[in-house]
Amino acid sequence: MLYVADMAEATASIGDSEFDRDTAVTRREPGVYDIELSAGWTIISAVNGGYLLAVLGRALADALPHADPFTISAHYLTASHPGPAVIRTDTVRTGRTLSTGQASLFQYDDEGREVERIRVLASYGDLAQLPDDVRTSAKPPAIPPLEQCFGPQDAPDHRPVPGSSAIGDRLFLKLDPATLGWALGEPSGKGEMRAWFGLADGRDADPLSLLLAVDALPPTAFELGLSGWVPTVELTVHVRARPAPGPLRVSITTRNLAGGFLEEDAEIWDSADRLVAQSRQLARVRLS
């Protein structure tokens, strides 16, 4: 699904990277934003769902009085494509610690008709104001050290991962060998995917890039022995803390595939061993 670039020495910072430029929105009027969806974040010909969520997340951060997404739920209605799009936001409620808004992204079809691509409902706050108290039974995923994990550049003849796409050139991804059976034609049958994750230009993670990270790994369906596009139907992300600098660890599991749909539960851990984001996604799969 992804072709992954090597992570070079950091050349970009938050606010000054390709991710920031490609998710930047232009306010046309209060609550209405224009954006050119970049072809650099596509999977085959469709724009990646995590990138789209970050785009809408940035628009809501401007529209609402709070800047950080705490929870954001998206329904993907039709596939988005590179090119112009408009985002319309609506403030549902504002409070002292949380504000809630909704947003939709629209594009035009071949007949010039406006088509809604994705609709989200989100609550925003200030992550810096959260108390430090943490009581959890969650533990960081058991991923081997980064140098013991693999990306496509480590494969013989530097062959890209099957189904690779433009988004991979913008990512740093090193997969846990225990979840790489699918790439060797020997899927484990377990719905698991784990990896070290970052942006290829070295930009550190922030709350908005976490919205990308939860949907950037190869799908767990690959390790279940399935192949092909796995389009997202619904995705909910909970951002729990601002991530510390350094690569993230992403763990995704699927426990149930039924009726052509599966769920993916994701956890993202930062370099300080904090659980900084969680998500659940419902996706379609092709069974034949």
Image (cartoon, rainbow, N blue to C red):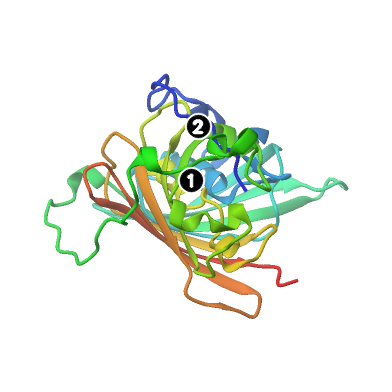
Residue underneath mark 1: 212
In the image, residue 204 sits, relative to residue 143, either above or below, namely: above
Q: Which quarter shows the C terminus?
A: bottom right
Q: Amino acid at mark 2?
A: Phe
Q: Position of residue 269 (x, y in %)?
A: 31, 50
In the image, residue 237 sits, relative to residue 111, either above or below, namely: below
The part of the image, by quadrant, that contains residue 139 is bottom left
Towards the viewer: 179 or 69: 179
Q: Which residue sits at x=41%, y=46%?
A: 210
Towards the viewer: 148 or 281: 148
Q: Position of residue 161 (x, y in %)?
A: 62, 44
Q: Amino acid at mark 1?
A: Leu
Q: In the rendered structure, are the residues bearing label 1 and label 2 in contact, judged by CB atoms less than 8 Å apart? A: yes
Q: Which residue sits at x=51%, y=50%?
A: 217
Q: Which residue sits at x=29%, y=42%?
A: 243
In the image, residue 74 sits, relative to residue 208, either above or below, namely: below
Disc nearer the start of the sequence (1/2): 2
Q: Position of residue 24 (x, y in %)?
A: 52, 31
Q: Position of residue 183 (x, y in %)?
A: 60, 52
Which label is found at residue 37?
A: none
The part of the image, by quadrant, that contains residue 13 is top left
Q: Dot 1 surroundings within 10 Å: few (below 14), some, or many (20 or more)?
A: many
Horizontal relation, residue 243 to residue 3: left or right:
left
Instruction: Identify the element where label 1 is drawn.
Output: helix
Task: State how many labels appear.
Answer: 2
Horizontal relation, residue 216 to residue 141: left or right:
right
Horizontal relation, residue 115 to residue 25: left or right:
right
Residue underneath mark 2: 19
Which residue is the extreme one toward the front? 156
Which residue is the extreme one toward the bottom? 259
